[in-house]
Image (cartoon, rainbow, N blue to C red):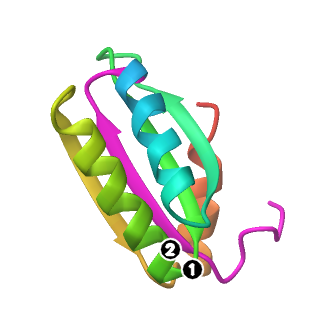
Amino acid sequence: MGNEYNGMAIGVFELDSECACFVALDAAAKAASVKIQSVERNRLKSGACVKMRGSIADVKAAMDVALATAAPISKVYAHTIIAAPSEGTEVAAAMTINK
């Protein structure tokens, strides 16, 4: 696992539409200084999950914009922000990318 995200908060949201995920992540990335870590397609549903990283303030601002952008066009299945991920959480987050 690379160290490029060490010390960064994690913001995760899952929507019922992969297309809506891209619309929401684009708005999030324009609203705050976050890095999009991954977009993971849900094989059982038509949706996807987005992981973004940055300072807690930037991730919160980006998440607020992403959810507001997604609300009229998609169902939000879940969303959360982890302010200070533990090493174990970092390992688990990295393991899910491209799965």
Rate crowding at label 2 as few (under 14), some (14 to 19) or many (20 or more) other CA atoms within 10 Å. Answer: many
Instruction: Look at 49% across and 59% down and name the residue there.
Output: 31
In the image, residue 10 sits, relative to residue 66, either above or below, namely below
The percent coordinates of residue 93 (x first, y second) are: 56, 56
The residue to which callout 2 is attached is 58
The percent coordinates of residue 56 (x first, y second) are: 48, 81
Q: Which mark is residue 83?
A: none
Q: Quadrant of the C terminus?
A: top right
Instruction: Look at 50% across and 85% down and name the residue there.
Output: 84
Residue toward you, 56 or 28: 28
Circle count: 2
Q: Is residue 86 magenta?
A: no
Amino acid type at mark 2: Asp
The residue to which callout 1 is attached is 55
In the image, residue 91 sits, relative to residue 9, either above or below, namely above
Is residue 91 toward the left or the right of residue 83 in the image? Answer: right
Circle 1/circle 2 CB separation < 8 Å: yes
Residue toward you, 33 or 94: 33
Rate crowding at label 1 as few (under 14), some (14 to 19) or many (20 or more) other CA atoms within 10 Å. Answer: some
In the image, residue 21 sits, relative to residue 45, either above or below, namely below
Q: Which residues are magenta?
A: 1-18
The percent coordinates of residue 61 (x first, y second) are: 39, 69
- Spatial CA distance of label 1 from label 2 is 5 Å
Q: Is residue 6 magenta?
A: yes
Instruction: Look at 34% across and 55% down and name the residue there.
Output: 65
Amino acid type at mark 1: Ser
Residue toward you, 91 or 16: 16
The picture quadrant where one finds residue 34 is bottom right
Q: Which structural element holds mark 1?
A: loop
The percent coordinates of residue 57 (x first, y second) are: 46, 81
Q: Which structural element holds mark 2?
A: helix
